[in-house]
Image (cartoon, coloured by chain):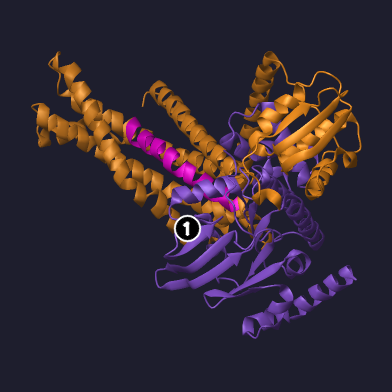
Amino acid sequence: MVTACEPESDAAPVIQVRGLDNRFGADVVHEGLDLDVPRGEILAVVGGSGTGKSVLMRSILGLQRPTAGRIEVFGQHLENADVTQQIMARRAGVLFQDGALFSSLTVLENVELPLKTHLPSLPTQLRRDLARSKIQLSGLSASASPKMPSELSGGMRKRVALARALALEPELLFLDEPTAGLDPIGAADFDRLLRTLQRALGLTVFLITHDLDTLYAICDKVAVIADRKILATAPLDKIEQLDHEWIRNYFHGPRARAAREQDGTAAG
Amino acid sequence: MSAREAVKNDGELVREPGSDGVLSARGDWTLANVERLSEQVDSLSAPATQLDASGISRLDASGALLLERLICRTGQNPAESGLSGQWRTLFEAVDSACDDEHEPEPARESQLQQILARIGRATVEAGQSTRELMNFLGITVHRFARTVAQPWRLRLTSTVYHMEQTGLDAAPLLILLAGLVGAVVAFLGATVLRDFGAELFVIDLVSFAFVREFGVLLTAVLLAGRTASAFCAQIGMMKSREELDAIRTLGLDEIEVLVLPRLIALLVTLPLLAFIATIAGLAGGLIVSVLTLDINLTLFIDRVEQTVTLKHYLVGMIKAPIFAVVIALIGCLEGLRVSGTAQSVGEHTTTAVVRSLTMVIVIDALAAIYFMEIGW
C-alpha cells in the first residue's frame, strides 16, 4: 500500500519536466521549460523575483494547471489531478514558505494528521510515537508537542512543518525558501539539519531559495531560472562560470563572495 | 539507495529457534509494515538479549524507531546488531534524536472540575469584557471629542467609504426585509382582527410597530450581523498582519484612524437606514391592506396621519444612535482583541455578532418598557 517500488534505474530523474508553459493572460511565466531532478540529490532552483520559481513548484505539485507541457514524477506522467494527488500525498512532502501549519491543531496533531489520513488503522499510541519521533528528528524537543503553532517562533514553525512533511516517509521533498525569515545562525542550523536528514533518509530534494549560504552549504546541483526557462542545471562551480547577466550579478556580487569565503573557511 | 532493488517484502521479527533470547529482524522495516511490526515488538514476552538486524532489507525512520526500541530492550550496542551499513546513518539519526524520552501526558482534570473551570472562566471573561468595553467607550469618546474640537483630524475619505459600505450597500437588503416583515405583520393582524370586524386597526398595528420598534430594530439586527462582523474581521486581519503596529509606530492613533471613521459612518447611516426601513415596512403593510382588506390608499395615509404623532417617531429614532454606537464599538473592539491566527479572527467575529445582537435586543426591550411606563 505504501510507496510502490517500481524499478527505476539510477539514470532516471525523480522529476522530469518537458516543455512546460505557464501563462497568466498575456503574462508568460514559463515557455518551453525543461528540468530534471536527479535522485538522491539536493537541487536548488534559483532565479530573480517573479521569474516563476514558485509557479514551477506549484505546477509540479499539481496546485496549478500548466498551460502546456509534460511533467513526470517517479516515472509517472502527471496527466490529471487524481494521479498527481496520489503521488504527491504518499511519496512527496512539502514545506511551504511560512510552514503552513494548521493553526487550530497542536504541533503533535499537525504531524499526526498525514498519518491519520493515510494510515487510519494505526493505533493511536503508535501514531503519536511516530509523530513524536519525527518532531525530534526535526530538531525540536518533546516539550514543543502540545504547543499551538501561534506560540512558536518562525524557525520552530519550519521545523514542525518539516516534521509534518516527513511524516509519511517521503522519497521526495519540496522546500519553498526554507531559510527565509530565519536569522543567519538559525538558517545555518536549518541547512545542516536538511543535509543530515537528506543523507540519512536518502531524500531527493527540490529546493527554492534566495539564500546564497544555503546554496554553498548544502546543494548538489543548482538550476537557474531566467528568461522563462531553466538556463542550466549543474553543480555550483559550473554555474558560476556561465556567461549570463543575471548569473554574473547573482554569483559575483558582494554577498556571493562572502558566502563563498565562509564556505571555504568552513571546509578548510 | 537499495530502495530500488527491493521487491515487495514484509518485515518481520522472529525468535531464533534453539538460541536463548536471540531475535532476528528481517525484511522491510518501513511505514507500510510498522503497524504489524509494532505489535510484534510489543508482544515480546520472553526476555530478549540480542538482536540480529542483518536481515533488514529496507529501513525508514518509522522502522528505525521500532528498531531503536528493541535495541533499548536488549541493551546491546547498536553497532553489534549487524544492521547493514547503508542504514546506519538513518538509524543513528533516529537513535540520537530519541535519547530524551518524551515527558508524560499532563493529568486530565475530572469532568466536574472541567465544568466548574469553564463556568469560572466564562464569568471572569464576561466581567473583563464588560470592563474592556467601558474602557474602550471612554477612549473613543475622548478621541471623538478631540476630533470635534479639531475637525481636520477626521479621516473624511475613510468615513465616507464606510458610509457607503454600511449604509448604501445595506439598503436594498433592508428594504426587502422590512417590506416583507411589514406585509407579514399586516397579514397576521388582518387574520385576527377580521373576526372582530376591526380591520381598520391593521393600519394602527403596522404603523405603531414600525415607527416605534421594528424600523430601527430590524435595521440594528441587520447591521449587527452585517457590519459588526465586517468591522471585526477587517480590523482583526489588520492586527494579525501587524498593520496596527505599523499605525502605532508611525505615530498615528488606531482609535482615530480605524474606529472613529467607522463609528461616525454608522452614526450617520443607521438612523437613515432606520427611516428607510420604517417606510418600507409601512409600504409592505399598505400593499397587503389594499390587496386583501377593503382599505384604499387614502384611507391608509389618513389613518397613519391621525395615529402616529411625532412622539412615536422619536421613541423609535432615539434608539438609532445608541444602536450605532453599540454595533460599531463592539465590532471594532473585538477586531482589536484578535490575537493573530485565522482561528482567532473567526472566534472574535462570532463574538462581535453575538454580543452586538444581544445588546441591541436587550436595549430595545428596556427602552420599550421605559417609554410605556412614562406614557409615550
Residue at (31, 36) in percent of width and height: B310
Verify whether residue A181 appears in magenta.
no
Does residue B176 appear left or right of residue A111 in this picture?
Answer: left
Does residue A18 appear left or right of residue B166 in this picture?
Answer: right
Q: Which quarter of the rendered picture does the C terminus of chain A lie within?
A: bottom right
Chain ID, orange in image: B
Q: Look at label 1 and name its amino acid.
A: Gln
Residue stretch in magenta: B213-239
Verify whether residue B217 appears in magenta.
yes
Residue at (36, 27) in percent of width and height: B376
Q: Quadrant of residue A168?
A: top right
Task: Specify the colour of chain A.
Answer: purple
Q: Chain of mark 1?
A: A
Q: Quadrant of residue A266?
A: bottom right
Q: Which quarter of the rendered picture does the N terminus of chain A lie within?
A: top right
> Is most of the magenta stretch helix, strand or loop?
helix
Residue at (66, 40) in percent of width and height: A111
Give the residue pinned by disc 1: A64
Q: Quadrant of residue B71?
A: top right
Q: Position of residue B30 (x, y in %)?
A: 68, 39
